[in-house]
């Protein structure tokens, strides 16, 4: 693939001992293990760079979110959710179509409702997305915003990597974690992701690697994606799940890189078997990007049948006890078939749970306890009608208030 060509492809024969002679300066030379002092300085500098990058990204994300909300609110007035694909353009780098499976991607893009264009990207073998708002929406914006949203670039970027180039960067990452710093070998993940993102730290990058399974199978090694669950071989080499014996990489090294990329730069790695899977992933990602404004809007919307918050947020009880009676009524209504008028009638007869418990203790027989609330009259619409709590609700509330069995069923069964 495009990024797999060049000096990176010859890394398999490079080792820490042959990478170069030590420099006469005080710092560690290429291929030489750094001492504790320079290593700590390097790690501290690396950590400060990540912290500064996160701060800049947070500021850019906040500004980008404000701009996106403005454009999304206007766009939602004119664009239907099922027509959103028409306003997304997929921008494919020319290097991707020069690969043997590039025609598969074109077939899938032609089947989508969205448009696509073949144009050189700032980083080779990348795919970006642009949202093109219709003129009726652009007329609602100011001149400054109109130029920005006439063809707005989305915050997603995908980079296609060859298996060999990806494994070379994994090897460099492993050496870095050991404190071995290599120079003039190939690009590491830190500089590569920074080059992909540019100064737009709010963007989310995805690395796609096609054919890594085939690459490992041809060398008689384990597949990093389809790992065998039960292997009959018990040799030491098989137990280490080698991905590249030349570079000394195992499946665990790939897992470590994936976690590091996700935590540090929010970068996702796709391992795909063939070009058809790659094209299908591009189609799925395109649909998700097109519908993202509608998804964000739906998450902010409230439903008409939801309450105004008085029930869902609970009952406020002051320090002086104000609100306890209302809370007691709400608690009663949580039991099955106890409506608001019934709960009000019980709370009026026994304003607190403690008073109801005391009344149960004053009863002499079990029958009297179960029917304590039977004759309590219920008011409906402010008027006293010939309606009472009844024996069923009285019995269930008695069991609820006095039983110590957490698994007891309140309703009668049979």
Image: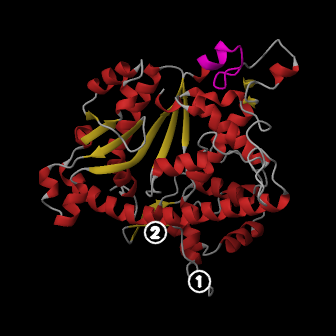
On the picture, is 100 further left or further right than 399? left
Image marks 2 and 1: residues in contact by CB distance under 8 Å: no
Q: In the image, what residue occupies the spot 27% across and 41% down? A: 88
Q: Which mark is residue 134?
A: none
Residue 71 belongs to magenta span: no
On the picture, is 146 further left or further right than 209? left
Q: In the image, what residue occupies the spot 40% across and 25% down? A: 279
Q: Position of residue 234 (x, y in %)?
A: 87, 16
Local SS, label 2: loop
* Quarter of image, res 19: top right
Q: Which residue is labeled 2 in the image?
A: 310
Q: Say whether residue 311 is visible.
A: no
Q: Which mark is residue 318?
A: 1
Q: Which residues are magenta?
A: 214-227
Q: Position of residue 400 (x, y in %)?
A: 68, 56
Relative depth, front residue between 85 and 381: 85
Local SS, label 1: loop
Q: How is the image coloured?
A: secondary structure
């Amino acid at each position: 693939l495009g990024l797999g060509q060049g000096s990176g492809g010859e890394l398999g024969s490079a080792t820490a001992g042959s990478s170069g002679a030590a420099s006469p300066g005080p710092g560690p030379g290429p291929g030489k293990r750094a001492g504790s002092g320079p290593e700590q300085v390097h790690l501290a500098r690396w950590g400060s760079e990540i912290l500064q990058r996160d701060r800049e990204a947070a500021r850019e994300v906040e500004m980008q979110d404000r701009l996106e909300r403005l454009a999304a609110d206007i766009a939602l007035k004119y664009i239907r959710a099922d027509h959103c694909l028409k306003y997304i353009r997929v921008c494919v780098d020319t290097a991707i179509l020069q690969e043997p499976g590039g025609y598969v991607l074109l077939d899938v893009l032609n089947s989508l409702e969205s448009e696509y264009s073949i144009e050189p990207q700032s980083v080779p073998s990348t795919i970006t997305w642009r949202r093109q708002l219709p003129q009726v929406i652009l007329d609602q914006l100011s001149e400054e915003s109109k130029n920005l949203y006439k063809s707005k670039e989305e915050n997603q970027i995908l980079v296609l990597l060859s298996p060999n180039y990806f494994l070379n960067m994994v090897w460099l990452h492993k050496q870095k974690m050991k404190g071995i710093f290599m120079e003039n070998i190939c690009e590491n993940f830190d500089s590569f992701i920074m080059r992909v993102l540019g100064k737009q730290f709010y963007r989310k990058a995805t690395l796609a690697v096609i054919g890594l399974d085939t690459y490992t199978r041809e060398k008689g090694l384990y597949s990093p994606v389809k790992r065998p669950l039960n292997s009959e071989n018990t040799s030491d080499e098989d137990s280490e799940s080698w991905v590249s014996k030349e570079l000394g990489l195992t499946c665990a090294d790939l897992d470590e890189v994936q976690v590091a990329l996700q935590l540090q730069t929010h970068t996702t790695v796709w391992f795909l078997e063939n070009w058809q899977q790659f094209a299908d992933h591009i189609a799925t990602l395109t649909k998700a990007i097109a519908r993202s404004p509608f998804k964000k809007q739906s998450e902010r919307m409230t439903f008409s049948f939801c309450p105004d918050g008085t029930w869902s947020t609970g009952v406020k009880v002051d320090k002086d006890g104000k609100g306890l009676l209302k809370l007691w009524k709400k608690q009663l209504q949580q039991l099955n078939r106890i409506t608001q008028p019934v709960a009000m009638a019980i709370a009026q007869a026994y304003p607190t749970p403690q008073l109801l418990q005391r009344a149960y203790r004053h009863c002499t027989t079990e029958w009297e306890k179960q029917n304590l609330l039977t004759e309590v009259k219920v008011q409906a619409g402010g008027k006293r009608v010939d309606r009472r709590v009844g024996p069923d609700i009285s019995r269930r509330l008695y069991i609820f208030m006095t039983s110590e069995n957490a698994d007891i069923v309140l309703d009668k069964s049979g």
